[in-house]
Image (cartoon, grey):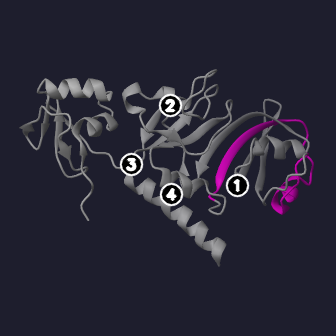
């Protein structure tokens, strides 16, 4: 099946080359080419992933889905637009932000692995409640946790407001600077869930960082605020993890 054609100015704009107005001006100035031929009509129709585009002599790569791993720093909100705070999209060049959004969310002060994409189906597969893709967090906790905390997590504890959580894994790993170091594995994503679950067993989360989503771990080479594109293998791993967990749910 052939893909639907779209206007040249719309295609170049969606690929991060500028606004429709800016791209249209460049096309009319003779700076765009399709399959080696200069095109001056912004309405000229092109076929995604088939036609070869250049702008200003530079090849423009078709992108059918963009997938990024971000090491989210604190103080950025997991949203596309926010009137009060900077968002996670602020780390991307403005020309690349069009169509991108975070997959799920991390609280404003939570750090670590956050996926950014423009693929709604991919995002839904990883965040739909029935998919149950594991997410692993490292936390530093103030206060003495109940001895029964790991068991209560494993059984699915009840939060202070009566919310019932699915079974989770709590590993107590030691003490760091007077705080208890723990690792938490969740298969769901309720609001402030790690912090609320820790509070339910006597602790207070001082620092929280997401380490992994399904089989994908945060790249240790990424400093806070840095990101990189996922490899095809990583995208495939995440898709397979989501499909596998959905299949388990139906057995």
3D distance between C-alphas at marks 2 and 1: 24 Å
3D distance between C-alphas at marks 2 and 3: 16 Å
- Marked residue nearer the N-terminal end (2 or 3): 3
Q: Do callouts 2 and 3 mark residues in contact (Cβ within 8 Å)?
A: no
- Marked residue nearer the N-terminal end (4 or 1): 1
Query: Which residue is pictured at 34% across the width and 49% down the height?
Result: 64
Residue closer to the observer: 165 or 18? 18
In the rendered structure, the answer to whether residue 157 lies left or right of residue 65 reads right
* Residue found at the very far bottom of the displayed protein: 251
Query: Which residue is pictured at 20% across the width and 46% down the height?
Result: 46
Residue 95 location, quadrant: top left
In the rendered structure, the answer to whether residue 221 lies left or right of residue 24 reads right
Q: Which residue is mark 2?
A: 89
3D distance between C-alphas at marks 4 and 1: 16 Å
Q: Residues within 10 Å of mark 2 (few under 14, many from 20)?
A: many
Query: Which residue is pictured at 23% across the width and 28% down the height?
Result: 24
Q: Do callouts 2 and 1 mark residues in contact (Cβ within 8 Å)?
A: no
- Marked residue nearer the N-terminal end (3 or 1): 3
Report helix, strand or loop for mark 1: loop
Location of residue 177 in the rendering, given as x and y in whole percent from the top left corner: 78, 29
Magenta-drawn segment: 133-160
Image height of 60 relative to 170, above or below? above
- Residue 220 appears in view: no
Location of residue 223 in the rendering, given as x and y in whole percent from the top left corner: 52, 30
Report helix, strand or loop for mark 4: helix
Q: Which residue is mark 4?
A: 238
Q: Which residue is mark 1?
A: 188
- Is residue 173 located in the magenta-colored stretch of the structure? no
């Amino acid at each position: 099946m052939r893909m639907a054609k779209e206007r040249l100015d719309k295609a170049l704009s969606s690929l991060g080359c500028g606004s429709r107005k800016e791209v249209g001006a460049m096309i009319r100035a003779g700076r765009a080419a399709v399959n080696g031929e200069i095109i001056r009509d912004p309405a000229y129709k092109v076929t995604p992933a088939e036609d070869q585009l250049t702008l200003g002599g530079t090849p423009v790569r078709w992108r059918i889905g963009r997938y990024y791993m971000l090491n989210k720093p604190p103080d950025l909100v997991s949203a596309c637009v926010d009137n009060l705070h900077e968002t996670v999209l602020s780390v991307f060049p403005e020309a690349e932000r069009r169509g991108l959004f975070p997959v799920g969310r991390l609280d404003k002060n939570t750090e670590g692995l956050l996926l950014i994409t423009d693929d709604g189906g991919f995002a839904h597969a990883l965040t739909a409640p029935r998919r149950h893709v594991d997410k692993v967090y490292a936390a530093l906790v103030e206060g003495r946790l109940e001895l029964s905390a790991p068991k209560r997590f494993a059984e699915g504890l009840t939060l202070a407001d009566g919310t019932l959580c699915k079974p989770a894994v709590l590993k107590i790993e030691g003490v760091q600077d007077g705080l208890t170091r723990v690792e938490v594995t969740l298969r769901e994503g309720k609001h402030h869930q790690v912090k609320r679950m820790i509070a339910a067993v006597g602790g207070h989360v001082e620092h929280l960082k997401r380490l992994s989503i399904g089989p994908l771990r945060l790249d240790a080479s990424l400093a806070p605020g840095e990101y990189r594109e996922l490899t095809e293998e990583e995208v495939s791993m995440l898709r397979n993890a989501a499909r596998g967990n959905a299949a388990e749910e139906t057995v």
